[in-house]
Image (tube, grey):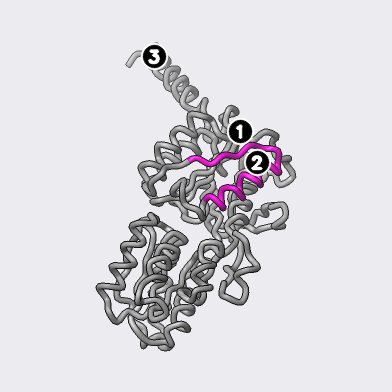
Amino acid sequence: MSRTNRVLTAFLAVTLVAGCGSTTKGSDPGAGGASTGTSRAADPNAPIKPGLKIAFLPKEIDNPYEVIVDNGGIAAVKELGGEGKEVGPSDASASSQVSYINTLIQQRQDAIVIAANDPNAVAPALKDAMSKGIPVVTYDSDAAPDARQVFVNQADSEEIGRSQVRLISQQIGGTGKIAILSATPNATNQNTWIQFMKDELTKPEYKGIELVKVAYGDDDDQKSFQEAQALLQSIPDLKGIISPTTVGISAAARYMSTSPYKGKVKLTGLGTPNQMRQFVKDGTVTEFALWDPAELGYLAGYAASALASGQISGKEGETLKAGKLGERKIGKNGEIILGPPTVFNAGNIDKYNF
């Protein structure tokens, strides 16, 4: 190669490198200039940017629980001078969520807050958002850790799973066959809780309890109703059902409340007081648990606003200032925990309205 060609080749290489580096991760000013946690250090004293536009993307737009969560998040964003909105699919599928993520990227939202239907299926679209400077917060059901900066967990996953086993064991007297009525087969939170349930059941104190089936209602009311019916009719000696999903537990309770199984088969899980009040009062359900979903959304809204403003990056040890909820430390893998769940029963359920 001639000297002239060598110089020209070197010049072109430098030019190409400079051109490729002109759009850096987290440097898109049109998306609020949010850091993805790798492009610049967080400044805890940075002010919240005015007028932030933050979108909340639930698993399913008609899920009553997630409507409460997202309304709590929208209230937090409004409290901080921004504008929040809830958008999402009418079915609990990852592919439907992906199309919404792509639209939100095109709209140049300042942050996306999502409850993932599948941790990996939504990851490429979320990574695309992050590469364009749009921070991502997950809540309730996590995405792949490298596809978001922060995961706002409603409570410690291990405690949720193990406490569900404790509740059903108390109600069935520590012996008998039980089943689990879950949401979708790929739901990150459900699968994590179920693994801890299975591990808890290996302890000697639960040797009299047998988990015979895990069914999936896909967070759809009618399918959950039918799955509950099928469990009870196909397993005649079933003693209890755990449904760690607000859609599932309310659908199962509705079926059981007018069936011969009422009072004979125990039902517990995760539900809202307003959904479950009538079933507690009529004796269909003894006890169930949940956290305050509005506070979960509120915490996610503050996390998204802080990320979009550069106050936090999602690194372990950082502190999030979360308004009326006080401060929360960011833990391993960007996890922030809201707090322990509350157990609801006939003695306290009327104290709650959500």
Point out the residue furthest to the left here.
Answer: 234
Is residue 39 something that shows in the picture?
no
Q: Earlier in the sequence, mark 1 or mark 3?
A: 3
Q: Earlier in the sequence, mark 2 or mark 1?
A: 1
Q: Label 2, label 1: how many angstroms apart (C-alpha)?
A: 8 Å
Which quarter shows the C terminus? bottom right
From which residue to which does the magenta span run? 67-87
Task: Indicate the amino acid at tag 1.
Answer: Gly
In the rendered image, residue 66, in percent from the top left (x then y), is placed at 51, 52
Mark 1: give few (<14), some (14-19) or many (20+) Cα within 10 Å: many
Nearest the viewer among 279 and 193 is 279
- Assign a secondary structure to mark 1: loop
Point out the residue furthest to the front here.
Answer: 258
In the rendered image, residue 258, in percent from the top left (x then y), is placed at 39, 70
In the rendered image, residue 348, in percent from the top left (x then y), is placed at 62, 73
Q: Which residue is mark 1?
A: 33
Task: Indicate the amino acid at tag 3.
Answer: Arg
| In the image, residue 61 lies in the stretch drawn in magenta | no
Q: Which residue is mark 2?
A: 310
Which quarter shows the N terminus? top left
Task: Indicate the amino acid at tag 2.
Answer: Gly
Q: What residue is shown at x 32% (from left), y 79% (from top)?
A: 238
The disc placed on residue 261 is none
In the rendered image, residue 289, in percent from the top left (x then y), is placed at 53, 69
Give the main secondary structure, helix, strand or loop, of the magenta stretch: helix
Q: What residue is shown at x 62% (from left), y 53% (from top)?
A: 299
- Assign a secondary structure to mark 2: loop
The disc placed on residue 3 is 3
Circles 2 and 1, Cβ within 8 Å, touching? The answer is yes
